[in-house]
């Protein structure tokens, strides 16, 4: 007899008290909720809960049982509200969980208080208010200290998810790395599985973002460990989901035989569970493998069947993924009209499931596969829609596709312009007007930042766009951020007798920057960004070594620090640098994923930027500081 069956048997026992039955129903609902079956969890509460949006029935229950039911209903309200994309349910979930916290506090049950606060943090995370979620989880972890408990384990898992969602990937990676020994000691296979799958997903993302092939290998190991622990815990649905993920991962590295093997396991598990929706998801993944193998007809057939199943199941996010794959297969078969219709449907459906990135990727597929068959107006509208949907994306591969599609759109629009009015027509002027329109849009989308606009346009060097503005489109100069004159005190230039004025101007442009960063990928990205400005960048990976460079006579015009460094923290280097007379007025910035802005500003930084999302704002920030304009 399974645990769920055993709990149902105990619930049916007429000798049980109302409080005991309520406790058993909550335990069963929690078991089903952990396995991802939220609807079954709702049904498990029986007479205690009439349904989503309603308060639980607490009459006849004592205080501990009532508090437990409130927490259970609050948690399920949050999950069901997220799954069904229903407005207002997260606030209701927060109210129910908050009420349970007050009751647990009155009952002096700190473990249940901590458990409820973790679930409250999850509600804030779903709403995108990551700071509130981070504060709640941080307080729970501080209060629990080093105690080994299920609540602490869940808080650690949720903390890593919050940091990843907030784009603080370094922090999420540190949480997983430091918590790994702790989870190895735990006896719960369920919690171990959840930890390993979260770690695997983070490593998979970072393998693309930071170009780390070793992270991909580690992700495979973590997914494998997660599959083992979910199998041991009896969580067949989670086990099947991980097997599907492994199939996709082996597809991404070109190991198709292994991909099919894992998808076979996932299919068998979902079939046993009679879960047609997730079975269709597995078939969609397999159709991607078949496409990679060149078996296009088989891929189209599987993807079509997945679309039909998911279309009847209300799973819009999964349906959008299947539509994208089906559209790709139709395109490869030369069925342009059908492919366009299917991909358009994917772009429309995904936002309904709160998944704009998936919709954006479908729009990119439309441009990549069918761009040549679209009218100029439709092509422009498709690209603009993709850019809008992906404006918040943190996936480097997706953003790379967006940039490539921008170049493809530009090429196709240039190759197939709208029929002109030939009366007084000038080819040169028409091309110049078209070029000006694209540059104007790029500058506005980039907030006036020329470096970012150049990247959107696919122009490799920042100075190339500056030259185009100065020579051909001076009327657009007002769209860029103001070019501010630098303070004369920053660089002292002695003009030699007879020296050419151009040489002096060139020297005035020579800016030396020290960047202290131990992550090679971040250091390389910053170096490339700043060197596009014509500045010289010296990179240092160790805090103690960097302090030596700061204390030397090296002529640095600006200092840029990460905080978490080997040898010495960036905040400490800033504090010591500010104490040096020669660096009392040197612009200092911190580019970090750490939550240390207040400490950094107290130490003396002029600007604090968040890594990685603010890298593109770095050049303009440094330029303003060099010009003497202080950051707010």
Image (tube, rainbow, N blue to C red):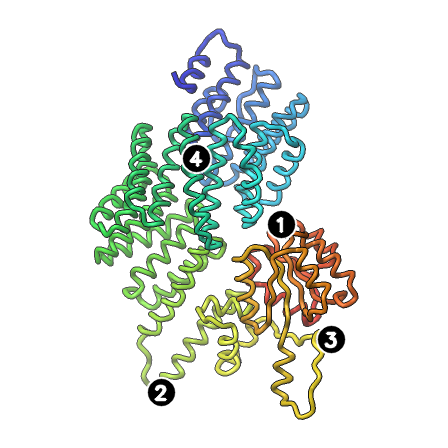
Taking 103 as reference, is 335 above or below it? below
In the figure, is residue 481 to the left or right of 211?
Answer: right
Residue under label 2, please give it.
Answer: 424
For the C terminus, the image quarter is bottom right
**Residue count near mark 1 (Cα–Cα under 10 Å), binned few <14, some 14–19, many ≥20:** some
Asked whether the beta carbons under mark 3 and mark 1 sit within 8 Å of each other, the answer is: no
**Residue count near mark 4 (Cα–Cα under 10 Å), binned few <14, some 14–19, many ≥20:** some
Asked whether the beta carbons under mark 2 and mark 3 sit within 8 Å of each other, the answer is: no
Residue 590 x/y as whole percent: 65, 58
Asked whether the beta carbons under mark 1 and mark 2 sit within 8 Å of each other, the answer is: no
In the figure, is residue 340 to the left or right of 146?
Answer: left
Cα distance in 3D space between marks 3 and 1:
32 Å
Cα distance in 3D space between marks 4 and 1:
29 Å
* Quarter of the image where one finds residue 434: bottom left
Residue under label 1, please give it.
Answer: 594
Residue at position x 39%, y 54% from top? 361
- Among numbered discs 4 and 1, the one appearing first in the sequence: 4
Residue under label 3, please give it.
Answer: 489
Instruction: Count every numbered label the image shows and give the total.
Output: 4
Q: Nearer the viewer, mark 2 or mark 3?
A: 3
Taking 619 as reference, is 545 above or below it? above
Cα distance in 3D space between marks 2 and 3:
54 Å
Q: Nearer the viewer, mark 4 or mark 3?
A: 4
In this view, the residue in front, 374 or 302, is: 302
**Given the current orientation, which residue lies at the most extreme top position?**
15
Residue under label 4, please give it.
Answer: 225
Residue 241 x/y as whole percent: 38, 36
**Given the current orientation, which residue lies at the most extreme bottom position?**
498
């Amino acid at each position: 007899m399974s645990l769920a069956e055993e709990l149902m048997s105990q619930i049916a026992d007429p000798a049980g008290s109302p409080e005991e039955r309520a406790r058993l129903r909550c335990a069963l609902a929690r078991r089903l909720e952990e396995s991802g079956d939220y609807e079954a969890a709702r049904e498990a509460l029986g007479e205690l809960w009439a349904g989503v949006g309603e308060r639980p029935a607490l009459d006849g229950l004592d205080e501990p049982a009532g508090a437990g039911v409130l927490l259970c209903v609050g948690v399920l309200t949050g999950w069901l509200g997220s799954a069904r994309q229903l407005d207002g349910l997260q606030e209701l979930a927060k109210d129910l969980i908050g009420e349970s916290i007050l009751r647990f506090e009155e009952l002096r049950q700190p473990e249940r208080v901590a458990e409820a606060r973790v679930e409250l943090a999850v509600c804030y995370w779903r709403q995108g208010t990551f700071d509130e979620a981070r504060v709640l989880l941080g307080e729970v972890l501080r209060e629990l200290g080093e105690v080994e408990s299920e609540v602490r384990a869940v808080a650690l898992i949720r903390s890593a998810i919050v940091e990843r969602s907030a784009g603080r990937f370094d922090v999420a990676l540190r949480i997983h790395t430091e918590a790994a020994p702790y989870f190895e000691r735990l006896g719960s296979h369920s919690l171990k599985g959840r930890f390993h799958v979260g770690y695997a997903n983070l490593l998979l993302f970072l393998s693309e973002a930071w170009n780390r092939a070793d992270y991909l290998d580690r992700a495979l190991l973590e997914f494998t460990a997660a599959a083992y622990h979910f199998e041991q815990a009896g969580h067949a649905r989670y086990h099947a989901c991980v097997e599907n993920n492994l199939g996709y991962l082996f597809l991404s590295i070109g190991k198709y035989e292994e991909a099919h093997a894992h998808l076979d396991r996932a299919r068998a598990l979902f079939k046993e569970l009679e879960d047609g929706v997730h079975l269709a998801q597995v078939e969609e993944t397999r159709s991607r493998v078949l496409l990679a193998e060149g078996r296009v007809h088989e891929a189209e057939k599987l993807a079509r069947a997945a679309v039909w199943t998911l279309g009847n199941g209300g799973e819009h996010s999964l349906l959008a993924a299947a539509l994208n794959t089906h559209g790709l297969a139709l395109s490869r078969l030369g069925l342009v009209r059908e492919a366009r219709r299917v991909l358009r449907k994917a772009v429309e459906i995904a936002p309904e499931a709160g998944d704009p990135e998936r919709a954006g990727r479908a729009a990119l597929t439309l441009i990549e596969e069918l761009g040549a068959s679209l009218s100029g107006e439709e092509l422009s509208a498709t690209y603009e829609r993709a850019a809008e949907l992906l404006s918040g994306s943190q996936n480097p591969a997706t953003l790379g596709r967006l940039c490539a599609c921008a170049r493809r759109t530009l090429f196709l629009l240039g190759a197939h312009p709208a029929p002109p009015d030939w009366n007084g027509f000038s080819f040169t002027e028409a091309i110049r007007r078209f070029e000006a329109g694209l540059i104007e849009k790029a500058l506005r989308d980039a907030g006036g930042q020329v470096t970012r606009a150049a990247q959107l346009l696919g122009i490799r060097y920042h100075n190339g766009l500056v030259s185009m503005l100065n020579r051909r489109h001076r009327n657009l100069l007002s769209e860029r951020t103001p070019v501010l004159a630098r303070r004369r005190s920053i660089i002292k230039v002695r003009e030699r007798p007879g020296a050419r004025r151009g040489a002096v101007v060139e020297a005035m442009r020579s800016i030396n920057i020290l960047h202290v960063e131990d992550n090679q990928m971040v250091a390389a990205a910053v170096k490339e960004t700043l060197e596009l400005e014509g500045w010289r960048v010296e990179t240092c990976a160790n805090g103690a070594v960097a302090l030596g460079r700061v204390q030397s006579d090296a002529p640095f015009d600006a200092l840029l620090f990460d905080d978490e460094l080997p040898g010495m923290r960036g905040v400490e280097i800033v504090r010591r640098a500010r104490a040096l007379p020669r660096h009392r007025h040197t612009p200092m910035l911190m580019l970090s994923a750490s939550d240390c802005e207040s400490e950094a500003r107290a130490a003396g930084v002029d600007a604090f930027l968040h890594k990685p999302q603010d890298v593109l704002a770095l050049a303009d920030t440094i330029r303003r500081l060099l010009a003497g304009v202080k950051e707010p």
